[in-house]
Amino acid sequence: AQSVSQHNHHVILSEAASLELGCNYSYGGTVNLFWYVQYPGQHLQLLLKYFSGDPLVKGIKGFEAEFIKSKFSFNLRKPSVQWSDTAEYFCAVSDDYKLSFGAGTTVTVRA
Amino acid sequence: EAGVAQSPRYKIIEKRQSVAFWCNPISGHATLYWYQQILGQGPKLLIQFQNNGVVDDSQLPKDRFSAERLKGVDSTLKIQPAKLEDSAVYLCASSPSGARWSYNEQFFGPGTRLTVL
């Protein structure tokens, strides 16, 4: 069974700061990679996904993520955060059978 | 497009009682998932249906949990009897059908927050 590790439990930063959230997974086969976000009071929703091709993928709201196969990593980035980016962020990895989530990172952006 | 609907939104029960959760997926979505999310953890898959057949229930505690998806649309998840450690948010998600289901985005409902006292 694969596992997904998110490096930070809680990140606090100021508006306009850059954000990077780490994600590593254990599965050695072909995987599909996702970042989901849950804004306060809202449902989990997809931020971006990677299946193949360019390892740098762009998602909604200015987020991007880079897949580094040799490091089993799929880190999420945003150059300049806004107060509205305050949310919980989940990395998820699927093989052919199951979607596995990391524990999540709570991001708090101070105005 | 209507999203995934779940009810109830909140439920408080005593241990050893029974509880049931209901999910209505997005219209036309063949695949339905139930997840358990314990506080401080990510969602954990309990069971996955493709239409009304079970694809994966390897992490479902079958001595107390059961789920069904009659007619390939709505689904119910039941816990009987509940334990303290079942306190969690139960999420339902759905995704479109496709040859490679793992590529598909999952659309999540609001969840049911269960508290077992």
Image (cartoon, coloured by chain):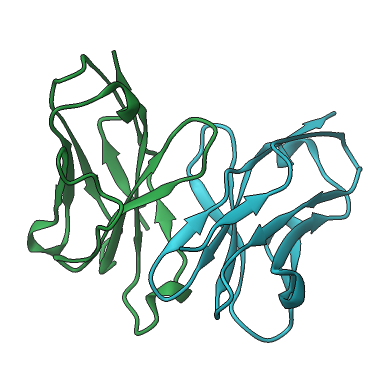
**Residue visible at 31% across and 29% down?**
B86
**Residue visible at 75% across and 54% down?**
A22
In the rendering, at what x and y percent does residue B116 appear? 28, 19
Examine the rendered structure and indicate whether residue B7 appears above or below residue B92. Answer: above
**Residue visible at 25% across and 30% down?**
B8
Which picture quadrant has residue A27?
Answer: bottom right
Drawn side of residue B74 relative to residue A16, left or right: left
**Residue visible at 83% across and 45% down?**
A81
Inspect this view and state whether residue A63 appears.
Answer: no
**Shade representing chain B:** green
Give the quadrant of the C terminus of chain B.
top left
Which picture quadrant has residue B88?
Answer: top left
Examine the rendered structure and indicate whether residue A68 appears above or below residue B52. Answer: below
| Residue placed furthest toward the right | A17
In the rendering, at what x and y percent does residue B109 appear? 37, 46
Which picture quadrant has residue B61?
Answer: top left
Frontmost residue, B4 versus A37: A37
Drawn side of residue B16 relative to residue B5, left or right: left
| Residue placed furthest toward the left | B71
**Shade representing chain A:** cyan
Frontmost residue, B104 versus B58: B58
Inspect this view and state whether residue A41 appears.
Answer: yes
In the rendering, at what x and y percent does residue B24 appear? 23, 50
In the rendering, at what x and y percent does residue B91 appear? 36, 43
Examine the rendered structure and indicate whether residue A55 appears above or below residue A48. Answer: below
Give the quadrant of the N terminus of chain B.
bottom left
Frontmost residue, A60 versus B85: B85
